[in-house]
């Protein structure tokens, strides 16, 4: 046999090598025909344009980048904010702007930075300073400083753009944003007015009335109301269970927000550092090898040497713990078939999924084996008994200050939860219920938190009264107290008329808890400046009806005081406002002559809002409306059309 091998060894080498080459070619060719998961079609537009996972991931990345650059301009509501809700909503807006011809080249986006910074700075000032913000907007020095700060922040974030943004990068995202703003501006300014209509609208906006006010809330007497009956609670629940809290006539609403159940594991860097035991020989050896860094005698330098070695070994142990956690997760998921960035989970996944308790034990064992240290068992917390609203996660003490680094960007726990594939339908990060997210969230102290979302629910009505019973009982008591306040409103008006608002406030509580008297609140027929509880169209109509009855050309006087003092119920807050009209300034010819283009544009927008009802732009460019216009249809993994609100995530 050996002779045969020696005689024909060249033939064996040639044949064997040929077989290896064929196997390699077959393997390489087979790999070439593997489908690119990013090209999987997950939706269509206009029934013919395909939307892939890569398209949606790019839109999601742009949405997050732009939200970091200009959160108020992107996420705030109209008239200046776009009110973009999520990556899918952003994809639809950008798509429509592009189809309408409003989107330019990336260079157009780069040129947009200064204008975007000005919009963002104005919105931020109004949000931070409330009624005083209007004055600050007219201060050039203050606003120039704010705009420059915003420009610097935008440029810093612009430099962090990753490949998920697509070929055009951050400037392409900015160009899309500019296109969307042009689209919405064109819609808002599309109307035209006659001179008579313009004067009428200007009068509605520019005629101002000043009032002093006391708002009497139900809090003082709500707790004394009788226990509401079960019938009352059920009636209130059924009427408002599908309404968002704060909306509707009374502001009652029990629609549950997007929410999650979760478990997480925390590795304390300080605990790991304290567990490091240094070998005295290693300490002295390190000192001898680094005398330039540690001059002086060993006794004097020992503490510094130990601190450096302990920090280095702590960093190594934390890195090893991170490697072990990733290995633990991948060993449990590597055989699962992929659907784009997420895994297709088997029916029994809940029973076999990698838990954080198991992960903590595995990580501890691995670090102890490789690093030869007593690694402290990571702390595990499980919050599976009840859902937590996503909007409340960042305020949770266990996640405050923690961010995950993904493609050079810091993402907090709320951002991760909102990206869940089970909620968004197209997760850019591949986060899904039941699978641990591999990237740790880290705080400034170097602690790691690894999280698994156990369950997720989109915004939905509660299934039963018991889920929101405490809120319904509270609202029932407030409503009963509101009825009492309305009955007592005549007495409040008489006291304010005879003794003044300060005296009225004094009768409603002690010095520490009595309602405040708000002086010189300004309002037009459409707007109330800086007083949220008085921002009621019913209240403004009542005030201007009194001014009309007195006469715009008259002056406040004792003779018209009975007309200038009034009470107005505020159902939204279950409160009663007691008002004293202190002055008014009607529209003048000079006002009409000094109207700016911005003022006229605002009047056009107001006319459009009145014609269509509600917030015109928000209604026209809401996810539901724009989805209908573009005929956006989501497609499931098997090619079937996904019906209902679940398609495309929250859209």
Image (spheres, rainbow, N blue to C red):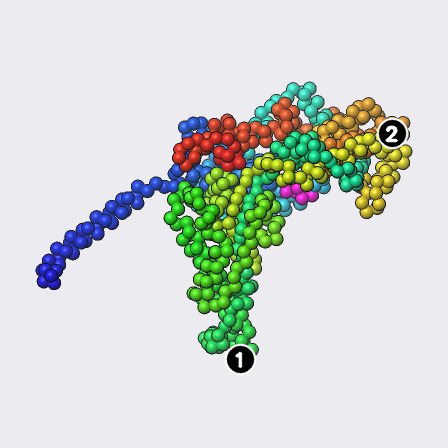
Nearer-the-camera pick, 634 or 128: 634
Which of the marked residues, 1 or 2, is nearer the chain's N terminus?
1
Which SS class for mark 2? helix
Where residue 60 sits in the image (x, y, percent)? 49, 41
> In the picture, which quadrant includes the N terminus?
bottom left
Where residue 271 sits in the image (x, y, percent)? 55, 64
Q: Is residue 278 magenta?
A: no
Q: Residue at x 48, y 56 (%)?
A: 358
Is 313 displayed left or right of 385 in the figure? left
Nearer-the-camera pick, 262 or 295: 262
Is 589 displayed left or right of 580 in the figure? left
The stretch in magenta equals 123-129
Q: Which residue is mark 1?
A: 297
Which SS class for mark 1? loop
Is the residue under label 2 in contact with that under label 1 (CB below 8 Å)? no
Alpha carbons under labels 1 and 2: distance apart = 89 Å
**Residue 216 - label:** none
Q: Which residue is mark 2?
A: 561
Q: How many marks?
A: 2
Q: Residue at x 12, y 63 (%)?
A: 2
Question: Residue 240 sits in which quadrant?
Answer: top right
Mark 1: few, some, or many residues within 10 Å (few <14, many ≥20)?
few
Where residue 638 sits in the image (x, y, percent)? 39, 35
Our reading of the magenta stretch's main secondary structure is helix
**Can residue 46 be seen in this snapshot?**
yes
Q: Is residue 124 magenta?
A: yes
Up-down: is 275 above or below 495? below
């Amino acid at each position: 046999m050996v002779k045969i091998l020696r005689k024909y060894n060249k033939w064996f080498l040639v044949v064997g090598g040929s077989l290896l080459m064929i196997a390699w070619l077959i393997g390489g060719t087979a790999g070439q025909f593997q489908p690119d998961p990013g090209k999987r079609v997950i939706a269509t537009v206009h029934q013919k344009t395909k939307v892939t996972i890569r398209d949606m991931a790019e839109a999601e990345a742009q949405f997050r980048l732009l939200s970091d650059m200009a959160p108020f301009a992107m996420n705030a509501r109209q008239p200046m904010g776009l009110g973009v809700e999520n990556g899918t909503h952003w994809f639809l807006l950008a798509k429509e702007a592009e189809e309408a011809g409003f989107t330019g080249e990336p260079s157009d986006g780069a040129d947009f930075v200064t204008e975007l910074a000005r919009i963002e700075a104005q919105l931020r000032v109004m949000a931070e300073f409330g009624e005083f913000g209007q004055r600050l907007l007219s201060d050039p020095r203050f606003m120039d400083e704010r705009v420059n700060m915003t420009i610097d922040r935008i440029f810093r974030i612009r430099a962090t753009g990753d490949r998920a943004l697509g070929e055009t990068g951050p400037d392409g995202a900015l160009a899309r944003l500019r296109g969307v703003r042009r689209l919405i501006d064109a819609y808002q300014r599309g109307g035209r007015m006659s001179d008579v209509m313009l004067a009428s609208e200007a009068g509605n906006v520019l005629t101002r009335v000043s009032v002093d006010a006391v708002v009497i809330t139900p809090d003082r007497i709500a707790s004394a109301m009788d226990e509401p009956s079960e019938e009352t609670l059920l009636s209130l629940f059924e009427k408002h269970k599908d309404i968002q809290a704060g909306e509707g006539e009374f502001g009652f609403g029990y629609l549950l927000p997007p929410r999650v159940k979760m478990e997480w594991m925390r590795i304390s860097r300080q605990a790991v550092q304290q567990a490091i035991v240094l070998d005295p020989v290693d300490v002295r050896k390190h000192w001898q090898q680094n005398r330039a860094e540690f001059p002086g005698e060993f006794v004097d330098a020992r503490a510094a040497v130990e601190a450096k070695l302990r920090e280095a070994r702590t960093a190594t142990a934390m890195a090893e713990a991170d490697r072990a956690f990733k290995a633990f997760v991948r060993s449990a998921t590597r055989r699962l078939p992929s659907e784009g960035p997420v895994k297709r989970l088997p029916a029994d996944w809940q029973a076999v999924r990698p838990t954080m308790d198991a992960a903590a034990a595995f990580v501890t064992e691995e670090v102890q084996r490789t690093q030869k240290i007593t690694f402290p068992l990571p702390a595990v917390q499980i919050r599976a008994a009840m859902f937590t609203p996503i909007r409340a996660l960042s305020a949770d003490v266990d996640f405050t200050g923690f961010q995950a680094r993904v493609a050079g960007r810091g993402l907090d726990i709320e951002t991760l939860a909102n990206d869940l594939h089970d909620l968004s339908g197209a997760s850019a990060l591949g986060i899904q219920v039941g699978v641990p997210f591999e990237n740790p969230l880290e705080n400034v102290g170097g602690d790691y938190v690894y999280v698994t979302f156990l369950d997720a629910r989109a915004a939905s009505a509660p299934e039963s009264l018991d889920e929101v019973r405490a809120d319904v009982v509270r609202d029932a008591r407030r409503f009963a107290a509101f009825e009492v306040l309305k009955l007592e409103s005549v007495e409040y008006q008489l006291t304010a008329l005879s003794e003044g608002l300060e005296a009225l406030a004094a009768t409603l509580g002690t010095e520490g808890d009595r309602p405040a008297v708000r002086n010189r609140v300004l309002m037009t027929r459409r707007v109330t400046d800086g007083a949220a509880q008085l921002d009621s169209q019913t209240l403004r109509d009542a005030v201007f009806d009194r001014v009309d009855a007195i006469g715009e050309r008259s002056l406040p006087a004792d003779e018209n005081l009975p007309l200038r003092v009034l009470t107005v119920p505020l159902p939204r807050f279950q409160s009663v406002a007691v008002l004293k009209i202190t002055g008014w300034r009607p529209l003048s010819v000079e006002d009409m002559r000094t109207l700016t283009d911005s003022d006229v544009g605002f009047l056009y927008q107001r006319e459009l809002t009145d014609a269509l009802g509600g917030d015109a732009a928000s209604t026209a460019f809401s996810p539901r409306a724009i989805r209908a216009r573009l005929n956006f249809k989501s497609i499931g993994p098997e090619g079937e059309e996904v019906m209902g609100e679940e398609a495309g995530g929250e859209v």
